[in-house]
């Protein structure tokens, strides 16, 4: 028996379950109203699957937007798969829930950020979302100087 309750681990699991439930509903019913998602994930996660050219462009993390065009959204207990359009090139992504770093729905000012603390991830209050590229329906965050996805404050998406 352990010496205490691991609230961080329990919250981590609950917040990943929330994302799973939201994405499952979207897979079955589509995105309602103005809802859309900025999802940042760790591209180095061993179970993350993406095209080689995307992994080269985003060697550590990537932010995708699920908004106007996406298809074949499949959700299971471990993660989700979705086909997104990158400059008129559809690409399939497989993203484990454990690889997600941020999940933001700017339409309702909701966000989760998972930070690593000595190997343990835990959610933090709503915070930064993702990048924006007006030329694509499903966008990735522009790389910063280190080549990682940029983080933009949610305030920049408010009307």
Image (tube, rainbow, N blue to C red):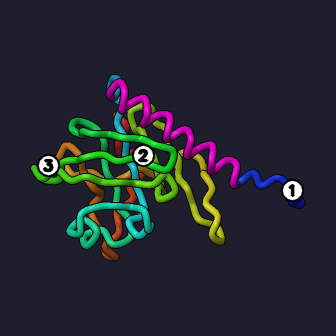
| Residue receiving disc 1 | 4
Which label lies toward us, 1 or 2?
1
Name the one closer to the observer, 97 or 60.
97
| Residue receiving disc 2 | 154
Q: Residue 49 in the image: x percent, y percent? A: 34, 61
Decide: marks 1, 2 in contact (CB < 8 A)?
no
Which label lies toward us, 2 or 3?
3
Residue 22 part of the magenta segment: yes
Q: Residue at x 37, y 37 (%)?
A: 158
Q: Residues within 10 Å of mark 3 (few under 14, many from 20)?
A: few
Secondary element at image label 2: helix
Q: Residues within 10 Å of mark 2 (few under 14, many from 20)?
A: some
Q: CA distance from mark 2 to mark 3?
A: 20 Å
State which quarter of the image contains the N terminus. bottom right
State which quarter of the image contains the C terminus. top left
Secondary element at image label 1: loop
Does 108 sit above or below residue 58? above
Which numbered disc, 1 or 3, marks the residue that appears first in the sequence?
A: 1
Q: Which mark is residue 99?
A: none
Which label lies toward us, 1 or 3?
1
Q: Quadrant of residue 53?
A: bottom left
Q: Which mark is residue 135?
A: 3
Secondary element at image label 3: loop
Does 47 sit above or below residue 156? below
Which numbered disc, 2 or 3, marks the residue that appears first in the sequence?
A: 3
Q: Residue 146 in the image: x percent, y percent? A: 34, 76
Please identify the dominant SS of the magenta region. Answer: helix
Does 11 sit above or below residue 43? above
Does 100 sit above or below residue 61? above
Magenta range is 9-30
Q: CA distance from mark 1 to mark 3?
A: 50 Å
């Amino acid at each position: 028996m352990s010496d205490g309750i691991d609230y961080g681990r329990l919250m981590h699991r609950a917040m990943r379950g929330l994302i799973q439930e939201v994405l499952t509903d979207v897979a079955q019913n589509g995105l309602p109203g103005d809802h859309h998602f900025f999802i940042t994930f760790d591209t180095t996660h061993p179970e993350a699957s993406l095209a080689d050219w995307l992994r080269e462009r985003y060697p550590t993390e990537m932010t995708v937007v699920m908004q106007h065009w996406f298809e074949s959204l499949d959700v299971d207990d471990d993660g989700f798969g979705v086909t997104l359009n990158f400059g008129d090139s559809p690409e399939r992504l497989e993203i484990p829930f454990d690889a997600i770093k941020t999940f933001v729905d700017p339409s309702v000012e909701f966000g989760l950020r998972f930070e690593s603390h000595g190997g343990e991830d835990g959610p933090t209050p709503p915070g930064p979302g993702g990048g924006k590229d007006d030329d694509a329906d499903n966008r990735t965050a522009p790389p910063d100087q280190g080549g990682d996805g940029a983080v933009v404050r949610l305030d920049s998406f408010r009307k």
